[in-house]
Image: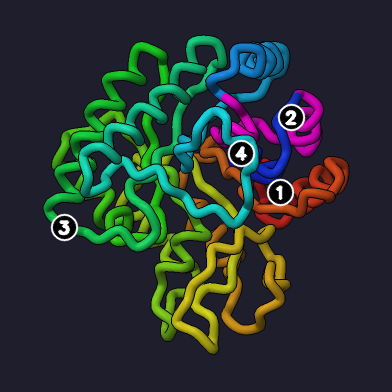
Amino acid sequence: MQPGLSTHVFFQHRLHPGLLDALAAAGARTIEVFAARHHFDYTDTPAVRELAAWFRSNDVRAVLHQPIYITDRADTQWSRHVAANLNLIAPEKTHRIAAMDEVKRALESAEQVPFAAIVLSLGLKDSPWDDAAIDHALSAIEHLKAFAAPLGVRLLLENMQNEVTTPDHLFYILKTGHFDSVGVCLDIGHLHLAQPVKNAPRDSGAAAAVELLGARIAQVHLHDNHGPFSDSADMKDEHLWPGDETPGDGTAGGETIDWAAVSAALAALPAATPGILEPACDRDEPAESITKKAIEAFRKLDCQ
């Protein structure tokens, strides 16, 4: 895979060229920009111009991650404990419209920033797989595909912690909608969380997903977690660095991802497939530390 990084690693900061420089210094050939108004305010013209100027001056591919929050412009007090609330397939029509409008606002930044793709999340954590979810997913994809196409942006559907976006169900949605131009962002951390507590495959289901989705996989998200905790039925999306053995909240238990097995499974993908590191980091961690950790992670995962 080719090395890539998500600005999710700096999610608690306002995104600026210095942080992008730190990601590029690690060797990232693709940078995925996380759309969140406290981080990258896609509604702020100077912020969009600044980002566009950086990508035009650097030989780095740009990808956008959809917003996961719907917030009022006046709301500047973001907290890491705020739950995602943007739901493209919400049961309530008003919620779906609000979510669609927010994603379109983010996509409009592609008029200046050369985004090649946008990563989309269908549903929230634990969204069920039912007829309504299927209908709303097909409608959302069709609508956003038509909006993104003139901007030169490809849609990529991400597997999440819900029933709607398992690899099998993503394949069903793409086939049913005849969405031949829509791709998949295979998230290894989320895939790991979806495995059974007992007798899970060593590769966290990566080989089966690659076999099923094949060339539809346009990029991969790489981050770690401890899966189902040994003392709880809960599963936490920790967004650790690959191979990090320390749970983010100090809770013991669970098994981290077997990256050797995952890497072997992902070797079936084209060598040019971006492998996007998507860890979460403390606000006070310096950019230089992030660069060093990313270089080491790329080495472990043989991203080059």
Nearer the observer: mark 4 or 2; the answer is: 2
Tell me whether the residue at label 4 lies in contact with that at label 1, contact meaning CB atoms closer than 8 angstroms. Answer: no
Q: Earlier in the sequence, mark 1 or mark 3?
A: 3
The count of marks equals 4
Front: mark 3 or 4: 3
Q: CA distance from mark 1 to mark 2?
A: 17 Å
Q: How busy is the neighbourhood of tag 3: few (under 14 within 10 Å), some, or many (20 plus)?
A: few
Local secondary structure at mark 2: helix
Whole-Å distance between the Cαs marked 3 and 4?
A: 36 Å
**Residue matched to label 4:** 2
SS assignment at label 1: helix
Q: Quadrant of the N terminus?
A: top right
Can residue 193 be seen here? The reply is yes
- Lower sequence index among marks 2 and 3: 2
Helix, strand or loop at mark 4: strand
Q: Nearer the viewer, residue 33 or 169?
A: 33
At numbered mark 3, what does the secondary structure look like: helix, strand or loop? Answer: loop
User: Could you tell me which residue is drawn at 69 percent across and 35 percent down?
Assistant: 28
Gap in Å between the C-alphas at discs 4 and 1?
Answer: 9 Å
